Amino acid sequence: MPQVDIDRLARDFWFRSIARQPALPVSNADLDSVQRELGLILPDFYRRVMSLENGGTSNYVSFERGEYYVPIPCFDSLEMVASGYEANPEEDGIPEGILVIGSNGHDFLGFDYRENPSRPAVVYREDYDSGIEQVSRSIDEFLSGLQREPD
């Protein structure tokens, strides 16, 4: 797995434009509170980018590994992450232990804590009729496969 420059990736993570106001950053106290509320450990990189901006569109549009391709949806605000998908997880088809961090309505990207509560895998579901698939075994592996929009 190639080495990822985490600092550069975090600084460059959020899409910026004149027409779009960035979301306010999330405080460490808020991140800690959500961790306690959910009983989960949020990955360090996720905490870092959320402390820069509370969700939105990333400059990284896909995860790719060989022929495997996953589009990156918009990242939800911390408030949505903490409450939006916990309300009706069975109705939404989201098993216990999966924390959705981004969605474009029908698809989602999330952390899967079912096998390792301290180091979640990254999962993706394309739509309500498709299954949840593991994209990577860890956030580090996921970060190494992120791709920007071609210029």
Image (tube, rainbow, N blue to C red):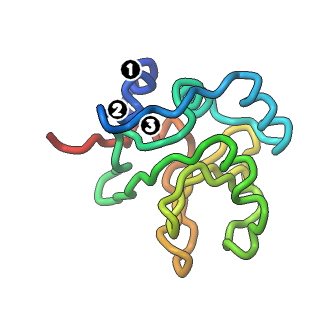
Front of the two marks 2 and 1: 2
Front of the two marks 3 and 2: 2
To which residue does mark 3 refer? 143
Rounded to the nearest angstrom, the CA distance separating label 3 from label 2 is 20 Å
Estimate how packed mark 1 is, as few (under 14), some (14 to 19) or many (20 or more) residues with alpha carbons within 10 Å: few
Q: Secondary structure at mark 3?
A: helix
Residue 126 at what x, y percent from top left?
47, 69
To which residue does mark 2 refer? 16
Residue 66 at what x, y percent from top left?
30, 53
**Relative to 42, residue 127 above or below:** below
Q: Nearer the N terminus, badge 2 or badge 1?
A: 1
- Please give the name of the residue rendered at 48% of the width and 40% of the height, measured from the top-left corner: 141
- Please give the name of the residue rendered at 56% of the width and 77% of the height, measured from the top-left corner: 128
Q: Nearer the N terminus, badge 3 or badge 2?
A: 2
Three-letter code, disc 3 = Leu
Residue 65 at what x, y percent from top left?
35, 50
Quarter of the image for residue 79 reads top right
Q: Secondary structure at mark 1?
A: helix
To which residue does mark 1 refer? 8
Estimate how packed mark 2 is, as few (under 14), some (14 to 19) or many (20 or more) residues with alpha carbons within 10 Å: some
